[in-house]
Amino acid sequence: MTDSATLARALPSIAYAGNPLDRADAVRSDPARLAAVQAAPGARLLVLDGLAPEFGADGGLTWAPLATAGEGAELVFLGLDADGQGCFAAVDPALGGSTAPAAPNLRALLDAMPAQDLAIYGGARSLVDWHARHRFCARCGHATRGAKGGWQRSCTNPACGAEHFPRVDPVTIMLVEHEGRLLLGRQPRFPAGRYSALAGFVEPGETVEEAVAREVLEEAGVRVHSVRYVASQPWPYPSSLMIACHALTDEPIIAIDHNELEDARWFTRAEVAAALEGRPDAPFGAPTHTAVARHLLEWWMVARG
Amino acid sequence: MTDSATLARALPSIAYAGNPLDRADAVRSDPARLAAVQAAPGARLLVLDGLAPEFGADGGLTWAPLATAGEGAELVFLGLDADGQGCFAAVDPALGGSTAPAAPNLRALLDAMPAQDLAIYGGARSLVDWHARHRFCARCGHATRGAKGGWQRSCTNPACGAEHFPRVDPVTIMLVEHEGRLLLGRQPRFPAGRYSALAGFVEPGETVEEAVAREVLEEAGVRVHSVRYVASQPWPYPSSLMIACHALTDEPIIAIDHNELEDARWFTRAEVAAALEGRPDAPFGAPTHTAVARHLLEWWMVARG
């Protein structure tokens, strides 16, 4: 095992992490401060077309003066930039919300976006999408309205008054190792040839470690032990917290759940290296560099080398 | 640092973890299998009064034949027991749902519950409470109905058809260390004298490590580095995933956010030991043994000794 500081230097940073904005919780909760930030001439609006960004000439985000948001626009306060100026996004009233992954052509452009812009976009996308899908109170069915700079929605029914908060869904994603080989699977929706780490949502009533063990058993019939946390990533499709882990197994016989996976196989270290290098003779295609699954594979090559 | 296997032997297990039921995902998704499990004579119902359990003579849970649930009861499939019998809970139609912690007298009884029963109860409580608070579609405001054995709610409006899934909210909880001392805080709602680890929800667009750093800076004005994952715990009030971490700081000057904390202080190793032992001369009261904050303190005494 390599120590964690050495590892951090050896590995690329996590995509969608590293948002440079100050979330400024104290501004959100103070209507007067929020109004002042909003009224300042330097306040700016993230330009979105629904949930997609408008790409600038450098492949990054595009901003407009906040005044362009239009009267009565539902605004989300993303945070303060390095100059103390407020950054906002507007929720398109026509947006119905989507739980689908971004379209492949959009994903390719996002994969090339500068890291800090990608992190700002990811957080903004999750929030805007959450507003679009939570215009009504799940408790009583009445309309909700945004509050606290878009970090809350409140029920407008005085008899209910429920407060709702942006959702973050924890997902485990894991490398399972046996005698120096890794278990990877492919879902039918993957591009041809790609294999990746198994993954699944954490359910109420279980730990991260229990969720890892359950998912691997459900999807591949493999019992794991020694589950270890590696890294985490916010994933805005629509709003997951990816919790990346490593586990060991002593029972490498795979029994695939074909409702979940099209295939699952063991890959050697040399095969994983070939895939990460994108070599033409690689036996599988590695996940894209913005996916934490790729980070896990790169971690494994260094940490378990 | 002590290796993780040695640590696992030295530490008590995590409360609310270790649910012995098989979640049997394949049963949930197959209406015919679910109906057969439900119709079997051994199927049983967790006895609840609203969200509180009925305590048995041993301080554990109480079960009744599933037939006692009554016609048309909204059932949640908790899983299969060791004999393959289905275990269920019913959602009380009068239950409005609550985001409040359990009442103190209930918490004392739960703290004494056998571990496996506590884990079953925690998962069941989160699910039943989620159903009670999600009877309407957040997307369109129409009524929802339970699906997949209570692991989904579906909108009854054909023009919408949104599917909703039980919510799990990731929360970071962290020990911050400086020169062998720990930063602990107290919230106004804590029992007199108690101090515990700082904590806060993970927001959209941030990693676990970023959430830890943000929360400590917001609540105590302290900048941390070297954030490290320690353990996780499902916490059913109402449905959190506690992600317990350790971090270091080089700047130990505390600036308390009094909206969040009543006090925050540095405690020495001897002071933490006295609190964990419950000694009368301890300078603070430690969190109860079912809280992952206590597990973190016990971990620290062993791992960083």
Image: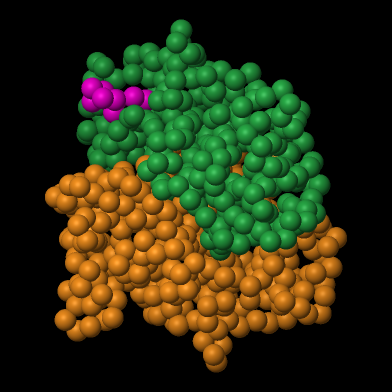
Chain colours: A green, B orange
Q: Report the side of A281 relative to B216 (left or right).
A: right
Please provide percent x and percent y for residue B191: 26, 73
Residue ranking furthest to the bottom: B57
Please provide percent x and percent y for residue B220: 21, 51
Residue ID at (27%, 46%): B224
Query: Camera-side residue: B18 or A128?
Result: B18
Query: Camera-side residue: A264 or B22?
Result: A264
Vertical position of residue B36 compared to residue A240: above or below: below
A82 drawn magenta:
yes
**Camera sees residue B133:** no
Residue ID at (21%, 55%): B178
Q: Report the side of B274 relative to A151 (left or right).
A: left
Classify the position of the N terminus of chain B by image quarter: bottom left
**Camera sees residue B60:** yes
Residue ID at (43%, 74%): B10
The range drawn in magenta is A80-89
Residue ID at (27%, 55%): B176
Rendering quarter of residue B131: bottom right
Vertical position of residue A69 compared to residue B111: above or below: above
Query: Camera-side residue: B25 or B46?
Result: B25
Classify the position of the C terminus of chain B by image quarter: bottom left
Please provide percent x and percent y for residue A13: 44, 33
Vertical position of residue A226 compared to residue A6: above or below: below
A53 drawn magenta:
no
Rendering quarter of residue A100: top right
Query: Camera-side residue: A159 or B296?
Result: B296
Q: Report the side of B213 relative to A136 (left or right).
A: left
